[in-house]
Image (cartoon, coloured by chain):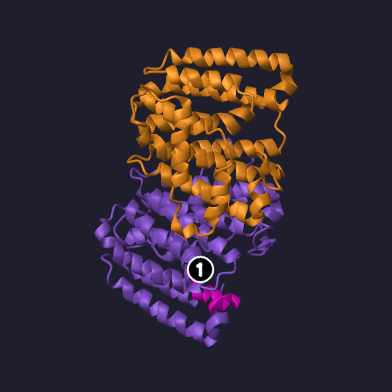
Chain colours: A purple, B orange
Amino acid sequence: MPRTPDELRLLVEEYLERLELTAELGTLATSMRYALAGGGKRIRPVLCLAVGEAVGADAAALLPAAAAVELVHSFSLVHDDLPSLDDDAVRRGRPSTWAAHGEATAILAGDALLAEAIRLALSYPSTAVARELVAATIAMIGGQQLDLEGADDLEGLHRLKTGALFRASVLCALWAAEVPPDEHPAWRAFADELGLLFQVVDDLLDGDGYVATVGEDGARRLAVATAARARGSLDAVPGETAVLAGIVAELASRTA
Amino acid sequence: MPRTPDELRLLVEEYLERLELTAELGTLATSMRYALAGGGKRIRPVLCLAVGEAVGADAAALLPAAAAVELVHSFSLVHDDLPSLDDDAVRRGRPSTWAAHGEATAILAGDALLAEAIRLALSYPSTAVARELVAATIAMIGGQQLDLEGADDLEGLHRLKTGALFRASVLCALWAAEVPPDEHPAWRAFADELGLLFQVVDDLLDGDGYVATVGEDGARRLAVATAARARGSLDAVPGETAVLAGIVAELASRTA
């Protein structure tokens, strides 16, 4: 009986709570844990675990990869919120990391979250998980720079800023579960639809991005079509995909 | 005939100049190259190549590891110089990266230098080079946080802020050259003496650190004793160490 998304979410929360950070980080661990405990929905690590279970891997073996993806996500939020970037003093209803711990510590905490993420990804025997995660991280950073410059290619921007880490959530699970690379393309197609779905719904909730370019109705139609394609792409992957279809439905209907 | 430190430095410069950064980084490549081209002495990558040659490896095969260490060093300088950290608008006689390219871009350029460094370290078949580099990066970040807090344990601080990356310069070469782990401890002892020597001479040049705690004469005596121990530690390592002895002499007598 595969675990439900909520059960996977609980596994992620427990793992993150118990995660031992490297001792040399000293007091920086406090701000890193603050950033990590921000009440996020853990969509990416849950996706990573669900893909792992779909291909028959044990969720426990996938947890370091799933947590690594979440730490990279957290690193990006901590740095993006900084005064010289998006200047967000509030994140999910509480002070953002720099607002709570100071700018200098937030910069270092973000750096350390990235480094610890890669340390986790390097706990697998092959370099593949870490390579996938680092490639996504680089794309994401490039996307943030593009955003700073005021990019007008919304789709290209989203592919970098959001899509890359969604893809890594799926691909890291495949590498960790040692799924042969010739089975990856079908999964990648699913990951890309899911990343787009997440972004369109995000824009609908925030009233920006796709809502600004194609209007609210247009964005709603895009979300419905993307969710259908994401579900459809699951037909092409080998494995037990009922839980993943549930994640598609959850992403399509989320309200926060 | 092993290469001299100056020949190795030239190899590093050429490699860094030709280094292809990931295309997705877009315009961020400009600020990253600015940070990398700052006229540093390339001590760490030269050390990495020299250790590689000492154990019989080809310098060309060591270049990705050597460059990875230099990119991590560059990442740390870019972030340490930021206004909310050391607030240094000048580095090596020209505007620091944030002063030249803006704070937001400097934060992202630092992030990207770290990520690209790890990408290079992941070009080896085993995870060992990347694991060594990430461990050193984490220690260094912890050291920077300790420094922010005004640590009074100077030795512990230096071990994290400077020592960790010197050790990685040596150890990454050993992992890349596939030197058996039972030969590592003697190299580690050399790396630790060399890191301390670098730091004491740095403090002598800057008139702070050890000069503030043990006085200028005390720091000079410490430098002489550490250089002697570094040379001595080379007797214990298997390999052709004449070039490394030259690096010790160079570090002991540097004036900038």
What is the x, y in percent for residue A79? Answer: 61, 55
Q: What's the chain of the residue with tag 1?
A: A
Can the viewer see residue B62? Answer: yes
Q: Residue visible at 66% across and 54% down?
A: B103
What is the x, y in percent for residue B48? Answer: 45, 30
Q: Residue visible at 29% across and 58% down?
A: A56
| Horizontal side, residue A236 vs residue B99: left or right | left
Q: Which residue is mark 1?
A: A157
Residue A208, magenta (yes or no): yes
Mark 1: secondary structure: helix
| Horizontal side, residue B142 vs residue B13: left or right | right
Main structural element of the magenta stretch: helix, strand or loop? helix
What is the x, y in percent for residue B52? Answer: 39, 28
Corner quadrant of residue B159: top right
Crowd rating for badge 1 (residues with CA inside 10 Å; few <14, some 14–19, many 20+)? many
Q: Give above or below for A83 relative to B81.
A: below
Q: Amino acid at mark 1?
A: Leu
Q: Give above or below for A93 relative to A122.
A: below
Corner quadrant of residue B78: top right
Q: Give above or below for A56 relative to B33.
A: below
Q: Give above or below for B21 relative to B91.
A: below
Residue B2, magenta (yes or no): no
- Asked whether A195 or B32 is in front, the reply is B32
Point out the image quarter for the N terminus of chain A.
Answer: bottom left
Can the viewer see residue A247? Answer: no
Span colored in magenta? A199-210
- Asked whether A12 or B150 is in front, the reply is B150
What is the x, y in percent for residue B215? Answer: 74, 17
Point out the image quarter for the C terminus of chain A.
Answer: bottom right
